[in-house]
Amino acid sequence: MSLDQAFASFDALWSPRIVTSVNDYDVRLTKVRGEHLWHVHDHTDEFFLVLDGELHIDLREPAGERRVTLPRGSLFTVPRGTEHKPFAPEGARLLLFEPTGTPTVGDRHDEIPDHVDATTGHALSE
């Protein structure tokens, strides 16, 4: 599969496409720009790989808030139960690796803004 062709097949932001499954996990591609929302995945970690652009992730941890900045080629895993908010002021293309059925807005979250797709992922052809 060509990642460039996969990304060219959709325009929606914050709306991941499932490109394949590995055991009980989805490999998702997504385009992002602007802010997502504060949310928590209670039962699973969340894996981010930045393929293009730069992603920031704000985290609320027991020791306080911190920001992780991920340039192109970087990866980060948000531990389960950690409140976080991804954002990309200039836009980014990401690969996500999550258990099948994991909602993009987590198990607990702020109000969902119109620009965020609350989904468990869409098939690449959608």
Image (tube, rainbow, N blue to C red):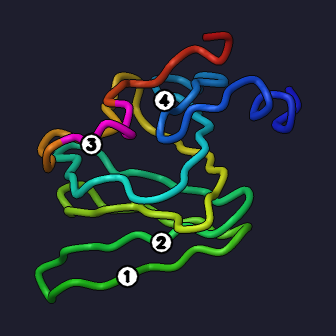
Quadrant of the image occupied by residue 103:
top left
Check disc 4 and report the residue beneath it: 25
Q: Secondary structure at mark 3?
A: loop
Q: Nearer the viewer, residue 19 or 109?
A: 109
Which residue occupies 80% across, 31% down?
Answer: 8
Disc nearer the start of the sequence (2/1): 2
Residue 88 versus residue 69 in the image, above or below: above
**Quarter of the figure with the C terminus:** top right
Check disc 1 and report the residue beneath it: 67
Disc nearer the start of the sequence (4/1): 4
Q: Residues within 10 Å of mark 4 (few under 14, many from 20)?
A: some
Which residue lies most toward the top here? 126
Disc nearer the start of the sequence (3/4): 4
Check disc 2 and report the residue beneath it: 56
Q: Secondary structure at mark 1?
A: strand
Disc nearer the start of the sequence (2/4): 4
Q: Is residue 25 magenta?
A: no
In this rendering, position of residue 59 left or right of residue 24: left
Q: Secondary structure at mark 2?
A: strand
Which residue occupies 40% across, 32% down?
Answer: 99
Check disc 3 and report the residue beneath it: 113
Labels 2 and 1 touching (C-beta < 8 A) = yes
Q: Nearer the viewer, mark 2 or mark 4?
A: 2
**What's the residue type where badge 1 is placed?**
Arg
